[in-house]
Image (tube, grey):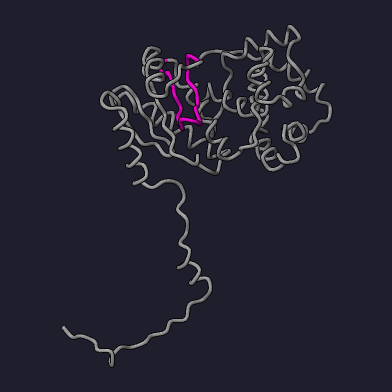
Amino acid sequence: MKLYTQETWSLIRLRLEPKALDSLARPAARQGFSPADYAQHVLALRARIGKGFTVRVEPPFVVVRDLPAAAMAHQSEDTVRWAATKLKQDFFTSDPASVLDVWLFKNAASYEANTLALFGERPTTPYGFYSPAHKALIMNISTGGGTLVHEIVHPFVEANFPACPAWFNEGLGSLYEQAGEESGHIHGYTNWRLPGLQKAIVAGKVPSFRVLTKTTAEEFYNEDPGSNYGQARYLCYYLQEQGLLVRFYKDFHARVAEDPTGFAALKRVLATEDMDGFKKRWETWVLALSFSQR
């Protein structure tokens, strides 16, 4: 093997354009999480949960279920993967900032016991919930996949629209509690919230849209007259049926600094200043709807 001496070293100069030099100094940031990131996450999960659970990666989520792998495929592929793909198609450009776990417990007893054992708290809903603190969606999957799709909406809203008020966050989430696919896009259908909203309309207890959109999170969740979720959902459903929902989301998102409630965006996409008149027309439209389990 020939060794080069100091006398025979060669000096080669290469001219680098500024862009090339910049790319060497600062490599492009990776988007999302790598397979290694998910592998490490799954290893940590398995050490925590022990036996009896099946784990499956469905980016940007990791699905954990206390049932065999064969029983997990439906929720993982047909619900989690499908919902994430379709929501990103119409609304969201960014995944959640952290890998999130989707815990699917097989029945109410498992849901209640494991929520307490794993997270140190008791669930406040029989269906499921999203916990930003635990970076987890925690579900009683025996109640169906509707709540799961609803809760999948929330971390995407958190990542893409952090200034989103509760009324639209929950309206969009609850729209997809009963959902399918129309022309290749996610589509909400009428659901179990409809009869309660119709009763509230007949009783004259549904507030104006100005009042609904002005609600703080505290007011929306804890001072609900009984119609907040239904009103928000069926406003989103109306916008969807008129082909205006994606447009409303984009308009609201773009101007949220000047319109934090979304009321001005709502008037723009509806092309009306008479929101009291719109509410009357919307109520008549809602009363004509019907709900049948799909």
Q: Nearer the viewer, residue 95 or 40?
A: 40
Residue 193 falls in image quadrant: top right
User: In the displayed image of the protein, which residue is found farthest to the left?
Assistant: 1
User: Is 291 rendered above or below residue 41?
Assistant: above
Residue reaching furthest to the right = 274
Instruction: Determine the residue positioned at 47% across, 55% down.
Output: 29
Query: Which contiguous range is marked in magenta?
Result: 125-142
- Specify whether residue 11 is painted magenta: no
| Residue 189 appears left or right of 99 | right
Q: Is residue 251 left or right of residue 173?
A: right
Residue 259 lies, with reference to residue 51, above or below; the image says below
Residue at image position (41%, 39%) is 59
Vertical order, 41 against 109 (above or below): below
Label count reads 0
Q: Quadrant of residue 269?
A: top right
In percent of width and height, residue 37 lies at 37, 45
Q: Residue at x 63, y 36 (%)?
A: 246
- Left or right side of 159 for 4: left
Instruction: State the image quarter where residue 80 is shown.
Output: top left
Quadrant of the frame with the N terminus = bottom left
Q: Quick check: is 126 in the magenta stretch?
A: yes
